[in-house]
């Protein structure tokens, strides 16, 4: 798939923002882990326990793939150019921003570099990646039948977070905190988020079809 120079420039700038935010948060997580007596490894484990980090990491990789010329991307990176992969990441990053804005932003007040990383990861990258999706993805190839496959990522994360939390004795998000809420409530919360993710995927597919219809009268 040929990529315009404008799309590559946008992807490059967005990728740089994403990698900066991820690097800043990694530094802060390691520092916090050391300060809390959990050491370097504890900080690294905590960093990779968050859906926010993992999803922003996928977004940064996809943007990096989009920034490269078509022939320069290695096969493993080229897979992040697939319309389905980009769409699944888009739905995931929208979940990141929405859940943070609606639920998580009220429970803490980040300062300094943490505030910068927080804003970039939750408020800047989601719209940037959504614009990239709109620009880069050929919407006609998206099908609702792919949604169950796209659900593998958030479902896999939910299992990962619960297993890791059981070993660590702490959970990355309050709505999956088994110690406080218990498994029935946590499983219900997880099911709701998965349902929202599926609806977002469907909304993106329908939005793409509406765009095709809007453009159709102008086609030869």
Image: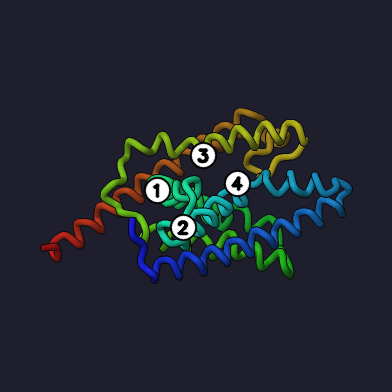
Horizontal and vertical percent for residue 214? Answer: 20, 61
Judge left or right: residue 63 versus residue 210: right
For disc 1, the marked residue is 82
Q: Earlier in the sequence, mark 4 or mark 1?
A: 4
Q: Nearer the viewer, residue 7 or 99?
A: 7
Label 4: element kind: helix
Q: Nearer the viewer, mark 1 or mark 3?
A: 1
For the residues marked 2 and 1, what is the alpha-carbon distance in whole angstroms?
16 Å
For disc 3, the marked residue is 153
Note whether 155 is above or below 20 in the view shown: above
Q: Nearer the viewer, mark 3 or mark 2?
A: 2
Q: Which of marks 2 and 4 is in front?
A: 2
Using a 10 Å C-alpha cutoff, classify the residue at mark 4 as few (fewer than 14 neighbours), some (14 to 19) or many (20 or more).
many
Judge left or right: residue 173 versus residue 188: right
Q: Residue at x 45, y 70 (%)?
A: 9
Horizontal and vertical percent for residue 126? Answer: 50, 59
Using a 10 Å C-alpha cutoff, classify the residue at mark 2 as few (fewer than 14 neighbours), some (14 to 19) or many (20 or more).
few
Q: Quadrant of residue 145?
A: top left
Tell me, yes or no, whether the two marked residues, 3 and 2, touch with CB atoms within 8 Å: no
- The number of callouts visible is 4
Task: Determine which of the numbered discs, if any, sits on residue 72 in the image.
Answer: 2
* Image quarter hosting the N terminus: bottom left
Q: Which of marks 2 and 1 is nearer the N terminus?
A: 2
Tell me, yes or no, whether the two marked residues, 3 and 4, touch with CB atoms within 8 Å: no
For disc 4, the marked residue is 51
């Amino acid at each position: 798939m040929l990529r315009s120079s404008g799309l590559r420039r946008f992807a490059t700038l967005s990728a740089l923002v994403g990698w900066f935010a991820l690097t800043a948060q990694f530094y802060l997580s390691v520092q916090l882990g050391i300060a809390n007596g959990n050491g370097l490894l504890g900080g690294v484990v905590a960093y990779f326990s968050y859906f926010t980090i993992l999803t922003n990491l996928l977004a940064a990789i996809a943007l990096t793939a989009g920034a490269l010329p078509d022939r320069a991307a290695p096969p493993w990176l080229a897979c992040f150019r697939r319309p389905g992969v980009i769409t699944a990441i888009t739905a995931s990053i929208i979940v990141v921003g929405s859940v943070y804005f609606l639920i998580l932003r009220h429970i803490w007040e980040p300062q300094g570099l943490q505030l910068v990383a927080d804003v970039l990861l939750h408020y800047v990258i989601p719209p940037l990646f959504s614009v990239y999706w709109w620009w880069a993805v050929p919407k006609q190839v998206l099908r609702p039948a792919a949604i169950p496959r796209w659900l593998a990522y958030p479902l896999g994360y939910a299992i990962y977070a619960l297993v890791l939390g059981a070993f660590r004795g702490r959970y990355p998000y309050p709505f999956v905190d088994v110690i406080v809420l218990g498994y029935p409530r946590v499983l219900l919360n997880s099911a709701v988020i998965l349902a929202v993710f599926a609806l977002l995927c469907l909304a993106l597919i329908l939005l793409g079809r509406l765009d095709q219809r809007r453009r159709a009268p102008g086609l030869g």
